[in-house]
Amino acid sequence: MRKRSALRLTAEVVFPKGTKRRCFVRRIVKAWRGFIKDANDKRLAVAVFYRHWRISFRCPDVSVVVPVYNVEPYVRRCLNSLQNQTLETVEFVCVNDGSTDGSLEILREYARKDPRFKVINRKNAGYGAALNLGFKKARGDYVTTLDPDDWIEPSAYERLVATAQKFDCDMVKANYWEEGSGAAIKRELFKAFGYLAPFSPIEQPKIMLTTPAIWAALYRRSFLINNGLALTERPGSSYQDTAFTLCCWMAARRVVLMEDAFVHYWRNRADSATNSGGFIFAVCEEYELARAYLERNLPKLSVFTTILTEREINTYRWNFNRILPSERLEFCQRWVRDLEYERSKGWLDEKFLPKYHWDIIQKLFSNPEDVAKLDRV
């Protein structure tokens, strides 16, 4: 009698009242018998089995995609923080992007213990491709990502989902903690914009100037699908979040910002893309995609033209300071070509740009060779 009652209880929770449940019971009764046959604690077996089927059959509120590539030393810390989430209606889609270390076995270990973990194994294709695949397989109303060397507060997704549902928004963005250089530093990105007050980015276009931090956010899955928003697919991890974030700001109609910081962003990985050279023109390709999206949606998004140019100059300055001195002349020549394109479109306007940006632009137009010799811009 206890077995039948547990099955019936599971069916009643998974399906609305009045729905035919007979097929469901037939489907799981075989699995149920095998599950409890060797269990010493029958009461615990009932509880675990019930939780497994409730999570498996209900669509989660949020899907968290974890792109994994050779992160064996760090990934347990990330997965433990996910396992400790207070939100049960969540799934963790772990995409193993061709790891050659023990990362895949660790993912499978967590998936065996917790039905919220799903593992996808694929050949290496890069960070953007891994996230896109995870978003495609996601079932949640909202999606987000967490890098495998970062970790997150236990109540994070419960609170993010509650905020998203309360305000019925396309995106929720939060602050984050920066780790790796002593005490954690809270990075507050949105002080100037106000918290827990829904707005459209068209009304506050300078929101586009904030740090991307795609993992400190929730995105309505239907919003991404309907607007064709995805990450750039190229080998490695090379700033694929740039165009994605910019296009999300331009496409969103309702956004909410949270003062809380949930994600702990770890900066001390020597092999991280932001800590290494290479990919000289990756950011240029990202802004080319963002400009193309903007142009396809003019004049509706015309308010973003000068803001996008300002954001681009900020990013190109950062990129100049990051790359090797021997790479800077070639990068400056590409920078000039992009600026000339924006000038031809009327997006380059002195009165909308900070003075130090305008000074750099004039130097680049005048003599990019001299700019390439500078230590920093």
Image (tube, rainbow, N blue to C red):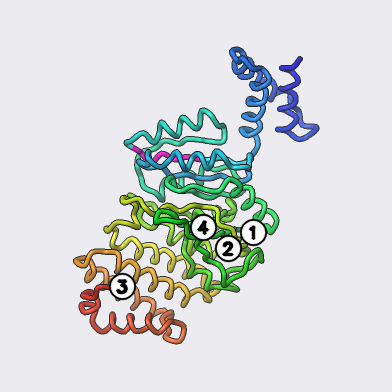
Q: Secondary structure at mark 2?
A: loop
Q: Earlier in the sequence, mark 1 or mark 3?
A: 1
Could you classify mark 1 by the number of other residues whose Cα lies within 10 Å: few (under 14), some (14-19), or many (20 or more)?
Answer: many
Mark nearer the viewer, 1 or 2: 1
| Amino acid on which the number 2 mark rests in the picture | Ala
| Amino acid on which the number 3 mark rests in the picture | Trp
Q: Which residues are magenta?
A: 93-99
Q: CA distance from mark 4 to mark 1?
A: 20 Å
Q: Earlier in the sequence, mark 4 or mark 2?
A: 4
* Percent position of residue 166, x then y: 70, 56
Name the quarter where the C terminus is drawn.
Answer: bottom left
Q: CA distance from mark 3 to mark 4?
A: 31 Å
Q: Which residue is mark 4?
A: 176
* Residues at circles 3 and 2 in contact by the CB criterion of under 8 Å: no
The reply to whether the magenta stretch includes residue 364 is: no
Residue, x 25% and y 73% (percent of image)?
375
Q: Which residue is mark 2?
A: 252
Q: Which residue is mark 3?
A: 335
| Amino acid on which the number 4 mark rests in the picture | Tyr
- Which residue extends farthest front? 183
Looking at the image, residue 271 lies above or below residue 315: above
| Amino acid on which the number 1 mark rests in the picture | Cys
* Percent position of residue 80, x then y: 50, 39
* Percent position of residue 87, x then y: 63, 42
Residue, x 32% and y 57% (percent of image)?
275
Q: CA distance from mark 3 to mark 2?
A: 28 Å
Mark nearer the viewer, 4 or 2: 4
Q: CA distance from mark 1 to mark 3?
A: 36 Å
* Percent position of residue 72, x then y: 37, 38
* Residues at circles 4 and 2 in contact by the CB criterion of under 8 Å: no
Could you classify mark 3 by the number of other residues whose Cα lies within 10 Å: few (under 14), some (14-19), or many (20 or more)?
Answer: many
* Residues at circles 1 and 2 in contact by the CB criterion of under 8 Å: yes
